[in-house]
Image (cartoon, rainbow, N blue to C red):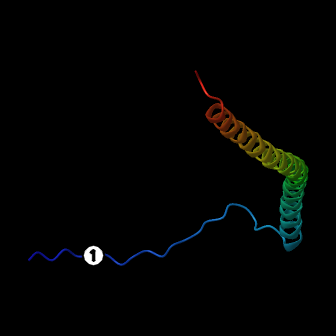
Amino acid sequence: MIDIPVGKPRPFLIRRYGNPPSPVSQCKKRIDQLTDTLYDSNLRCEALSLNLQAASYALESAERERDRAVEEHTKLRKEVVGLHCELRRLQDRIKTGGWDLIRLSDSVDIV
């Protein structure tokens, strides 16, 4: 095995050019950043509010449409029930008329 000499690691240095900013300027810079962030957040909130409002109106419209469709369905269901009753009455009348014709033809002698 070969031994390779490893040198001592050099310390990590951060070099700054110029004087470090004063605490007041750092604070002003941070306030500006926070102001920008707050403005952006307010814009996003306003956009979300508008989207929520539009969704609310769409939901109300869909619920009204659903209620109208349910009313129409109920009305049509009642009409179908009435038509079924009328159909059964007509079927009974036709059946009775058919039996009457059979009895009548049995009572009449065909020569």
Callout 1: SS: loop
Q: Residue furthest left?
A: 1
Q: Is residue 72 left or right of residue 110?
A: right
Residue situated in front as seen by the camera: 104 or 99: 104
Locate the N terminus and report the quarter of the image it occupies: bottom left
**Label 1 Cα crowd, 10 Å radius (few <14 / some 14-19 / many 20+):** few
Residue situated in front as seen by the camera: 85 or 49: 85
- Asked where in the image residue 16 lies, by quadrant, the reply is bottom right
Q: Position of residue 111 (x, y in %)?
A: 58, 21
Residue drawn at point x = 89 percent, y = 71 percent: 24
Q: Position of residue 70 (x, y in %)?
A: 84, 51
- The residue singled out by tag 1 in the image is 6
Q: Is residue 49 above or below residue 31?
A: above
Residue situated in front as seen by the camera: 24 or 35: 35
Q: Is residue 15 left or right of residue 71?
A: left
Q: Is residue 92 above or below residue 4?
A: above
In the rendered structure, which amino acid carries the disc numbered 1? Val
Residue drawn at point x = 15 percent, y = 77 percent: 3
Q: Is residue 53 left or right of residue 99?
A: right
Q: Position of residue 106 (x, y in %)?
A: 62, 35
Residue drawn at point x = 84 percent, y = 51 percent: 74
